[in-house]
């Protein structure tokens, strides 16, 4: 006899959720269980399931579960897709029932009001669970056992060493060989869609214990996350093999306040968290904001933060309205967040109107761009786009603004405009092609064209041999300025080592930069003897301490440029000749603006060697430049 379709009873109390009790069964038995409505404060012991809706399930079978109502009635609840169906079959126990929470079963997906109402409980549901059961999907290629086995082997090998010791140990060569030999299985694991699903960041980001299930194989989430965190030290190896372990370590304890004495203190900033989550996948781009409304940074009053943030989930607003609302509310409530909000703006190449004939989008007039209802003001971050890291991260020690404070107001007339005060320094004269992190790891060979470092030094800087004689502006060497620009001043290196940046002498960064050039170009006549001497002796250096790691991270998705008066610039990928370099009051890094008539477009943040420590504000004091108002649309 055909079963009737299951009908949800409305949740009449806004403080209740449903829990599924999954009946025991053997492999192949039909799924059965009961749904019970329970107050959120009286849930008892249960486990929460995390999975990817769109992942496949077993073929040629109907995806449903029989829901019993306690009166011998059974009704069919259709499951949307095979992923949850496969997950429930895998986690069902053979000899006892299991109390679980799974969104497809416990929330009426056909009731938008209930879905919105239940959203407020998501973080708490996963935080209060006794365990989180993560379903990575079916192991169709039988790679899970090999991948998890290697993870456990790496855990045992790495757990007895500090990151510094492992990175500098000669015995890491066999370890790296093991990674390379098992590249396929490890890459298949790190490429699992679950690790990039947007909502999982709050599901797995708490301190609740979790088990990762991939087919029939299981591993502890703590073990996997710990190994991936330690593999950060092998940046070059991960980049070469395409292993995205950083995507996994990003998720670990993301919703728990970190040690504020480490570089993880960045997490106290809500805007930084939205920026770091740009790689995640969401079916609804409004959820790029809403998924983080349960994050501690929303309520945090930490000096590095931008809270409290008064934003509510509102699905009646468009994506554009949602992003504008976030930026405006944060700037109005906390003017000190001016820099981080603008630094999070990352326009793709050719996304902005261009002033040059022959540009890709020259046919799109500025006026048409302004009228486009689907575009954001150039100063509002678009969380759907990601070109690279934020140079002005919260712990960043740059002080382009000196002692100035943000001076701006938001003008809401025909167009939404940010009227910001600052100084204009110079204009861009020449730009490189977009930079890619992999190019920093390529060494000079006989038949290879110029390496990236050679192309930029000769082509953009206009220099000949790598030397310490050519001067940059007034005092420092051009070589040092060039290498510091490409690496964002190596501030990330200091941050990760928890060392005060301004206590580290320039000689440390010069030696690392010179060592990179000598190792990359080797016996080339392009390297002067003074640069070779500056490189010091060729000793093993931990990968996390090498110049190339920090340059690759800072430069990815950016361009190298030179201004008319000779400043070196690491700028946004959308940068073009004629854009102006400005220091906006309250901005710890300079910004590139595009003048169009009497208005400006925000192109993005930049590093400009010689403007990172209050020099522009000193110029104002000396009368060399004057305060200016920029109307940014």
Image (tube, rainbow, N blue to C red):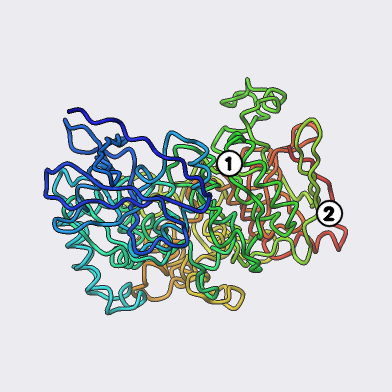
Against 160, residue 4 (above or below) is above
Count how many numbered circles sit on residues in the image: 2
Q: Quadrant of the N terminus?
A: top left
Q: Quadrant of the C terminus?
A: top right
Residue 286 visible in the current orientation = yes
Against 178, residue 282 (above or below) is above
Against 85, residue 190 (above or below) is below
Q: Which residue is mark 1?
A: 382
Query: On the picture, is 334 further left or further right than 385?
Result: right
Q: Nearer the viewer, mark 2 or mark 1?
A: 1
Disc 1 crowd, CA 10 A, few/some/many (<14, 14-19, 20+): many
Q: Are marks 2 and 1 in contact (CB under 8 Å)?
A: no
Tell me which residue sits at (42%, 63%) in the image.
Answer: 128
Tell me which residue sits at (53%, 58%) in the image.
Answer: 295
Q: Which residue is mark 2?
A: 625
Q: Residue furthest front?
A: 71
Q: Residue furthest right?
A: 623
Query: Where does the image place residue 73, in percent across and percent down from the top left?
Result: 26, 39
Query: On the picture, is 300 further left or further right than 130?
Result: right
Disc 2 crowd, CA 10 A, few/some/many (<14, 14-19, 20+): some
Query: Where does the image place residue 354, in percent across and percent down from the top left?
Result: 65, 30
Residue 521 visible in the current orientation = no
Q: Residue furthest top?
A: 363
Query: Where does the image place residue 98, in percent across and percent down from the top left?
Result: 25, 57
Tell me which residue sits at (68%, 59%) in the image.
Answer: 473
Tell me which residue sits at (32%, 75%) in the image.
Answer: 168
Foreground residue among 196 and 187: 196
SS for callout 2: loop
Query: On the picture, is 604 further left or further right than 467?
Result: right
Q: First in sequence, mark 2 or 1: give its number.
A: 1
Query: Where does the image place residue 478, in percent across and percent down from the top left?
Result: 59, 60
């Amino acid at each position: 006899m055909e079963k009737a379709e299951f009908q949800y009873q409305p949740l009449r109390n806004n403080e209740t959720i449903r829990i599924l009790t999954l009946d025991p069964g053997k492999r192949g038995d039909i799924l059965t269980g009961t749904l019970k409505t329970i107050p959120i404060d009286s849930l008892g012991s249960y486990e929460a399931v995390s999975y990817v809706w769109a992942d496949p399930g077993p073929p040629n079978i109907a995806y449903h579960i029989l829901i019993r109502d306690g009166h011998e009635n059974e009704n069919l609840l259709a499951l949307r897709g095979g992923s949850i169906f496969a997950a429930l079959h895998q986690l069902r126990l053979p000899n006892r029932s299991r109390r679980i929470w799974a969104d497809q079963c416990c929330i009426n997906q056909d009731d938008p009001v209930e879905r919105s109402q239940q959203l407020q409980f998501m973080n708490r549901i996963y935080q209060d669970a006794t365990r989180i059961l993560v379903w990575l999907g079916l192991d169709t290629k039988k790679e899970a056992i090999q991948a998890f086995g290697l993870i456990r082997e790496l855990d045992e090998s790495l757990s007895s060493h500090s990151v510094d010791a492992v990175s500098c140990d000669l015995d890491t060569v066999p370890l790296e060989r093991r990674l390379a030999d098992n590249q396929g299985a490890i890459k298949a694991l790190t490429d699992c869609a679950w690790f990039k699903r947007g909502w999982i960041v709050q599901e797995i980001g708490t301190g609740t214990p979790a088990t990762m299930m991939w087919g029939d194989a299981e591993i502890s989430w703590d073990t996997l996350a710990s190994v991936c965190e330690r593999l950060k030290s092998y940046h070059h190896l991960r980049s070469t093999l395409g292993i995205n372990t950083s995507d996994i370590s990003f998720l670990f304890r993301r919703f728990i306040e970190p040690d504020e004495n480490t570089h993880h203190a960045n997490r106290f900033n809500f805007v930084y968290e939205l920026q770091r989550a740009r790689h995640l996948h969401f079916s609804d781009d409004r959820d790029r904001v809403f998924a983080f409304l349960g994050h501690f940074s929303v309520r945090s009053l930490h000096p590095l933060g931008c809270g409290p943030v008064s934003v509510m989930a509102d699905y009646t607003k468009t994506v554009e309205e949602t992003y504008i609302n976030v930026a405006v509310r944060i700037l109005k409530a906390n003017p000190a967040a001016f820099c981080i909000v603008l630094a999070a703006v990352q326009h793709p190449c050719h996304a902005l109107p261009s002033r040059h004939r022959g540009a890709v989008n020259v046919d799109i007039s500025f006026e048409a761009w302004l009228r486009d209802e689907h575009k954001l003001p150039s100063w509002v971050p678009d969380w759907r786009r990601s070109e690279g890291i934020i140079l002005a991260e919260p712990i960043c020690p740059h002080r382009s603004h000196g002692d100035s404070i943000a001076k701006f107001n938001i003008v809401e007339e025909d167009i939404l405009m940010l009227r910001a005060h600052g100084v204009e320094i110079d204009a861009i004269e020449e730009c490189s092609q977009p930079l890619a992190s992999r190019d920093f790891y390529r060494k000079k060979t006989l038949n290879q064209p110029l390496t990236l470092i050679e192309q930029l030094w000769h082509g953009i800087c206009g220099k000949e041999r790598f030397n310490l004689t050519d001067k940059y502006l007034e005092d420092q060497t051009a070589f040092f300025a060039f290498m510091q620009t490409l690496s964002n001043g190596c501030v990330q290196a200091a941050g990760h080592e928890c060392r005060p940046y301004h206590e580290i002498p320039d000689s440390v960064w010069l030696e690392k930069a010179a060592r990179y050039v000598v190792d990359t170009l080797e016996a080339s006549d392009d390297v002067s003897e003074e640069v070779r001497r500056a490189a010091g002796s060729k000793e093993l250096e931990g990968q996390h301490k090498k110049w190339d790691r920090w340059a690759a991270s800072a430069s990815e998705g950016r361009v190298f440029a030179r201004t008319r008066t000779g400043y070196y610039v690491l700028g946004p990928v959308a940068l073009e000749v004629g854009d102006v370099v400005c220091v906006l009051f309250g901005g710890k890094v300079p910004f590139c603006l595009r003048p169009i008539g009497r208005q400006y477009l925000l192109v993005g943040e930049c590093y400009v060697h010689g403007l990172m420590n209050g020099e522009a504000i000193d110029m104002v004091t000396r009368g060399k430049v004057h305060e200016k108002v920029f109307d940014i649309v």
